[in-house]
Amino acid sequence: MSEYSYGTAARLATQQAPSAPPALRVVHQPEGIDLAAAETAAGQFLEALGISTASESLRGTPGRMARAYAELFSPRPFDLTTFPNDEGYDELVLARRIPLRSVCEHHLLPFTGTAHVGYLPGSRILGLSKLARVVEHFACRPQVQERLTKQVADWLQTQLEPKGVGVVIEAEHSCMTLRGVQATGSSTMTSTMLGLLRSDARSRSEFLSLTGAAS
Ligand SMILES: [Zn+2]
């Protein structure tokens, strides 16, 4: 699974009973988090900005900063469990309003919003909660929204081989709302459509209207 960037490692779980559906253990390991070094650097960073950490209230701040960012960059591992599509279900499967939090890689400030992820099943279907886990998997790293949207769609296309995949993300970037242009209340929408959700007008418009992206 070396096509994944950012050191993502994935392997097929082999310890299951023969009748169990295949599960892909999905793990994203950052290059190596050194909390002590991050804490030292955070202290120096604050000092360079003229912020003293001498008071009791701020004494622990560099350590808290280090742990907070480490958490933001460490998605929980999960098993991508798929099941045979025995009933031949061929309509859209859509998880709407999946909460999303990520960190913009240009400012290292958070962006938050929601993701809508849908697919047209092929021969296999996916545990519903897994769509949210895939979003989290790619969100927990320094990101740009455009890449995040495409990575979720591409990954599902590769792993599930559905007839189509659609991902719409709407997010508010604190680097835009809290600083710079201070565009409070503005949100950014991105979408990636693959397969029939891209090429078939009816499927595409159904997906977009169900996500609310078409209005
Ligand atoms: Zn930014």
Image (cartoon, rainbow, N blue to C red):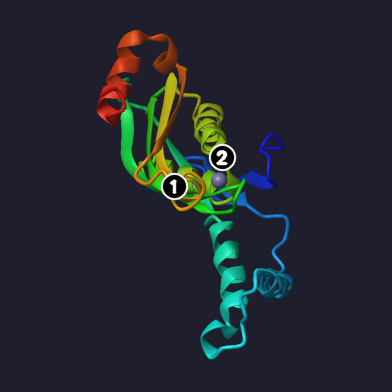
Residue located farthest toward the bottom when viewing the structure as drawn: 56
Viewer-nearest of discs 2 and 1: 1
Q: Residue at label 1?
A: 182
* Quadrant of the image occupied by residue 132: top left
**Left or right, 2 with reference to 150:** right
Can you say whether 55 is above or below 185 in the image?
below
Q: Name the spot of residue 66 as percent of width and height, x first.
A: 62, 69
Q: Residue at left 72%, top 55%?
A: 31
* Disc 2: residue Cβ within 8 A of ligand 1's nearest atom: no
Q: Secondary structure at mark 2?
A: loop
Q: Residue at left 62%, top 87%?
A: 54
Q: Residue at left 43%, top 18%?
A: 163
**Left or right, 214 with reference to 193:** left
Distance between mark 2 and mark 1 Cα atoms: 18 Å
Q: Name the spot of residue 137 as percent of width and height, x first.
A: 53, 47
Dividing the image into 4 quarters, which one contains the N terminus? Answer: top right
**Left or right, 204 with reference to 2:** left
1 or 118: which is nearer to us? 118
Q: Secondary structure at mark 1?
A: loop
119 or 61: which is nearer to us? 61
* Quadrant of the image occupied by residue 190: top left
Dividing the image into 4 quarters, which one contains the C terminus? Answer: top left
Q: Residues within 10 Å of mark 1 (few under 14, many from 20)?
A: few
Q: Residue at label 2?
A: 144
Q: Name the spot of residue 72 as percent of width and height, x first.
A: 54, 59
Whether label 2 touches label 1, CB < 8 Å: no
Q: Amino acid at mark 1?
A: Gln
160 or 34: which is nearer to us? 34
12 or 15: which is nearer to us? 12
Can you say whether 59 is above or below 36 in the image?
below
